[in-house]
Amino acid sequence: MGMVRDGFEIVEAFIPSELVNTALLELENSEELYSMCGVRNAEAKFKFVGRICASEFVQGKLKQYLPGKAQLVRAIVFDKTLESNWFVAWHQDKTVALSEKMEMPGWGPWSVKDGVVHVQPPLQVLENMLTFRIHLDPAGKKNGCLKVVPKSHEIGVIDQNEIASIVESSEVRFCEIGAGGAVLMRPHILHSSSKSKSGGHRRVLHLEYSNYQLESGLKWAASITKRKAPIS
């Protein structure tokens, strides 16, 4: 079982406890406002994101699964609690964040989220991406951990009307994991999560990378965002 065969991999103790504690301390002292969807453009708002992205843990997996030059596409911090709680229906992550809108065959529809251009790219782009869900708190069934359908990324981009029947006839895996662990996955694997039924936080750093070569002049949004303060 693993990324190559099933489209996802669970790695316990992916980052050390020291780095987890650094991230939690910064989040707890942050003035960033949390929404139901978390904090977008996290690479520009939190110093710990840069440290984790540059770490041997992330870079090692990128070399293993995304040969060539992989770049950060998007970074989001989620914090699911009883007060800020949500259910996520079964879906695929099918959009990427870009520096600007540029008409290209097979790319669309387009949208803007938190001032950043988003678009659904061709399947080839999604197949050249890797998502890291790095857990800063333990995640289990009681606090709405990620659920996935193994191998569903092999189907390609799935019609919304077909998702329910695919899930019903497939194995579902609960990605229960400890603090510091990570779930690695292809973005277009079918996944969902339930509302939390327990107290406390379920904080996750969501990182998306790609080694797909964009059109000349076009960049991934994460490469152009500017930090509020230099990384120290």
Image (cartoon, grey):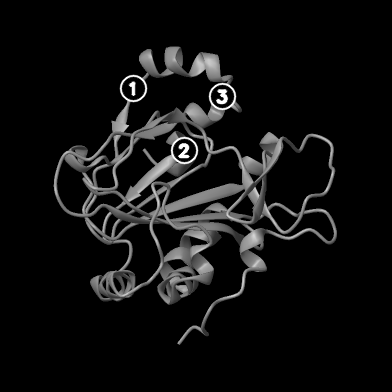
Q: Are the residues flagged by discs 2 and 3 in contact, CB closer than 8 Å?
A: no
Give the mark, 2 or 1, whose residue is nearer the N terminus. Answer: 2
Q: Crowding at label 1, few (<14), some or many (≥20) Cα neighbours within 10 Å?
A: few
How far apart marks 2 and 3 lie (CA) works out to 11 Å
In the rendered structure, which amino acid carries the disc numbered 3?
Ile
Give the amino acid at mark 2.
Answer: Gly
Q: Which residue does the image show at 48% across and 71% down from the upper left?
A: 45
Q: Nearer the viewer, residue 113 or 205?
A: 113
Q: Secondary structure at mark 2?
A: loop
Q: Quadrant of the C terminus?
A: bottom left
Horizontally, is 170 left or right of 123 in the view?
Answer: left
Q: Residue 155: which disc?
A: 3
Q: Position of residue 126 (x, y in %)?
A: 62, 41
The residue labelled by disc 1 is 171
Q: Decide if residue 76 is on the left or right side of residue 63.
A: left
Q: Of the numbered discs in the image, which one, if any, rests on residue 7?
A: 2
In percent of width and height, residue 41 lies at 53, 61
